[in-house]
Amino acid sequence: MALNRYRLRHLANKGHRGAHLAQNLLEKPDRLIGLILLGNNIVNLVASPLAAYLGYRLYGDVGIFSATVMFIVAVLIFAEVTPKTLAALHPEKFAFPASYIYTPLQYIAYPVVLLINAIANGLLKLVGININSQGLSSLSRDELRTVVKEAGSLIPSAHQDMLIGILDLESITVEDIMIPRNEVMGVDIDGDWESIRSQIVNAPFTRMPVYQENMDNIIGFIHLRKIFPRIVEDKITLKELKQNLREPYFIPEGTSLNRQLLNFQHEKRRIGLVVDEYGDIQGLVTLEDLLEEIVGEFTNDPATLMTDIHPQEDGSYVIDGSTHVRDVNKALQWKLNDNGPRTINGLVLEHLETIPETGTSVLIDGHPIEIVRMLNNSIRTVRIRPSVKIIKEPISS
């Protein structure tokens, strides 16, 4: 009963004979328990009067009491506690050899075991217990997370993070990882041709959205590698540029990363625009952003990882207001609430319920937060200190 069912299934699938027999026995635990207890109780019931008889023959009436006490102690130590503790600590070493014995015994004692199980199962049904329900059919996502974290040295820490990242894909939405609209770099097709050419040549990305007049009117995505040689040589025209556009791809903001990964694969896409329930563009998400939730950042450069989070000499951090709360938590190992607003700006505004002034301080989830800079009714920069413990002293009368 102490066997790890998943390891047992793995060994049985690999052809381990003892594991296969043990798995078959555990498929009907009521019969296995009935068989074990039948043999256990037969031995105890036969040995008890035998010990009392031997004690009486050797020492008379006093021997009966002495033999009974010695029998109880011997059974508890040598037949119950010691062997069962040892077997619980090393279940495979005992269960696999024992399965070779229990399997034939199950057939030999089948009529008796069947009768005992019928009576016992009938009593269980009377109290509303379903004997056919499986106690260990599958693991939930949270249970799998616990298994991965407790794997220790069996799974490298980097692989543990990747597995946990995969488990988290269902609970994280594209809104949590998207590039906010105000940070999206796009090409205005109605702009000056020289500025368009300069923007494409100096673009840090492979794909960029193309719009007319404003970001609400996206007309497509341009794959810069396809046109880069011609635009460098100044041989491409505006008409040819438009012909190389691919129609825009839109993603509802509540889409989970797990679903979006499948959507990207099905649509053969690597980039999409996140829209809200009204169809307004909220941001942009790429396949790279999504994969980074599993494998981590693709760069190990601390300067790249902490572009919006700047540590200070006094132990505080100056953070850009548009930084995602999840990114701050991951980078600094904090526990700011990320179930509401996605950004630091939104987190502070929701807490204050008003537009603050520069210099305003607030305590959120134990972290003192100071507004360093405001711009257009938006918090641009904050200073956040590590969490502090608030000790409430009793008011003396």
Image: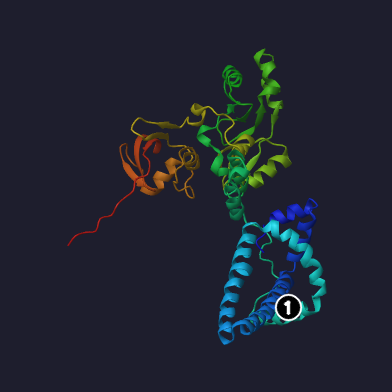
How many numbered callouts?
1
Tell me where residue 106 appears, x and y as whole percent.
79, 71
Residue sticking out furthest to the top: 233
Q: Is residue 12 left or right of residue 210?
A: right
Q: Which residue lies furthest to the left in this view?
A: 397
Residue 341 percent across, percent down from the top left? 47, 46
Residue 6 appears in the rendering: yes
Q: Which quarter of the picture shows residue 297?
A: top right
Q: Is residue 277 above or below residue 192?
A: below
Q: Mark 1 points at which residue?
A: 117
User: Relative to the observer, which residue lies in front, 49 or 137?
Assistant: 49
Residue 366 lies left or right of residue 298; in this view the side is left
Quarter that holds the C terminus: bottom left
Q: Residues within 10 Å of mark 1 (few under 14, many from 20)?
A: some
User: What residue appears at the point 37 percent right and 31 percent down from the top-left corner?
Assistant: 312
Q: Nearer the viewer, residue 333 or 39?
A: 39
Indicate the amino acid at tag 1.
Asn
Q: In which quarter of the image is the N terminus?
A: bottom right
Helix, strand or loop status at disc 1: helix
Q: Is residue 279 visible?
A: no
Which residue corresponds to the image point at 75% horizontal and 52% vertical from the top-left?
11
Picture quadrant where residue 69 is located: bottom right
Q: Does residue 295 sit above or below 50 in this rendering?
A: above
The x, y position of residue 197, in whole percent, is 61, 18
Q: Which residue is at 33% across, 33% downward?
A: 314
Task: Give 165 or 117, whichever is nearer the viewer.
Answer: 117
